[in-house]
Amino acid sequence: MRRFFIMFLLTMMILSGCSASKDITMPMINDIDSVQYVMPLESIQIPPLNPAEKRDKEIIEKILVWLSKSKVLGYKESFPSKSISPNYLSVKLTNGKFIKISPAIHGKEIVEVTTTPEVFQVLAPELNDWIHMGWKQDLISQKQ
């Protein structure tokens, strides 16, 4: 019976795309070309953060620290969504690839890190708070 239960759990994890062994390789500051704060439902456009600029680099480093302290909760294969996502960060890497960092729909302290073709869910409360509200202090006050 116990063996059947373990096999059932493993099968469900495989079918749902979950794994406990997956890990994220976080980018370093030198890997980042720019970071764009995207607001799909707003008319405001925030200029991208450039790691060559001192103040922008400080903000990007703060985001990277939050990511490095985060705990990976799981991952799944990405799939196209028909809904408009909330505000998110679009990180353009120097190799031309992109990473999307957005608040998770189901958790106040969870963010989703999309590295095509996978979506990692990570526990990162400070980053989640920053994406929701903290960005205003860093991004709007800095550009004035």
Image (tube, helix red, strand yellow):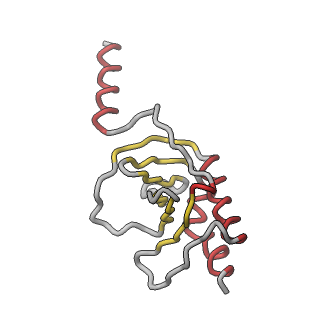
Of 133 and 89, nearer the camera is 89
Image height check: is 49 above or below 103? Answer: below
Q: Is residue 67 left or right of residue 97?
A: right
Residue at 57 percent across and 43 percent down: it is 71
Which of the image's four quarters has the C terminus?
A: bottom right
Q: Position of residue 92 (x, y in %)?
A: 49, 62
Q: Tag count in the figure?
A: 0
Image height check: is 5 above or below 34? Answer: above
Q: Position of residue 30 (x, y in %)?
A: 62, 56
Of 121 and 116, nearer the camera is 116
Residue at 67 percent across and 75 percent down: it is 137
Of 139 and 4, nearer the camera is 139
Name the quadrant containing residue 12: top left
Residue at 52 percent across and 59 percent down: it is 94
Which of the image's four quarters has the N terminus?
A: top left
Of 36 and 110, nearer the camera is 36
Q: Position of residue 81 (x, y in %)?
A: 29, 60
Q: Position of residue 143 (x, y in %)?
A: 65, 83
Q: Is residue 32 left or right of residue 54?
A: left
Residue at 59 percent across and 71 percent down: it is 49
